[in-house]
Image (cartoon, rainbow, N blue to C red):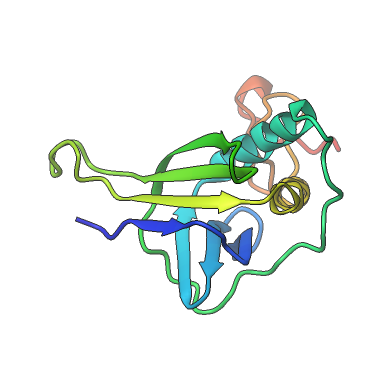
Amino acid sequence: MSESYRLDAPDHFTVGTVGPPGERTFYLQGREGRSLVTLKCEKTQVAALGDYLSGLLARMTGGSPAAGKPQALLEPIEAAWPVGSLGVGYDEASDRIIVVANEAVDDEQETPGEAATARFAITRAQAATFVAHAHTLQRAGRPACPMCGEPKDATHVCPRANGHVVHRE
């Protein structure tokens, strides 16, 4: 069983990547005091979290704060565990957005209830900065094929082009 984490007032909350486009590994990271939590996640999870937080901030009274300077991943970049699912909530009493990451588990090896969780209670400003940074990371990836939408590189063979390499930009 992996360790669970709870950061009630993280001073650092970010997303980042390691590796070149097409081979990037995405990480979600938070730090509170001396506790540094780094989790491995998928590009689609980062995109979904960024989109959801953007919509949540837009719906909140008081408006969305301006995004701050994106925070880089802190060393060491060692994932505690891979993220299986993400959830978001709001704690009105503390005016913090709650991001909960649940560990990805193999159904055959783990019994229910053994998945670790990481809970980050972030400020609206941290959420706005996360959203801007997540969108920047999405744009920095490989371009999408105009025909099938899959990531395109020099060896991309589009299934909609009858097996031919697509070179259109």
User: Is the residue 58 above or below the residue 96 in the image?
Assistant: above
Give the percent coordinates (x, y) of residue 137.
72, 52
Who's the residue at 60% across and 42% down the image? 97
Give the percent coordinates (x, y) of residue 17.
61, 61
**In-front residue for pair 162/126:** 126
Give the percent coordinates (x, y) of residue 124.
72, 46
**In-front residue for pair 153/48:** 48
Give the percent coordinates (x, y) of residue 33.
52, 75
Who's the residue at 79% across and 38% down the image? 167
Q: Is residue 148 left or right of residue 79?
A: right
In the rendered image, the quadrant that contains the C terminus is top right
User: Is the residue 133 above or below the residue 166 in the image?
Assistant: below
Who's the residue at 65% across and 32% down the image? 52
Who's the residue at 67% across and 25% down the image? 148
Outermost residue toward the front in this view: 93
Q: Is residue 108 left or right of residue 32?
A: left
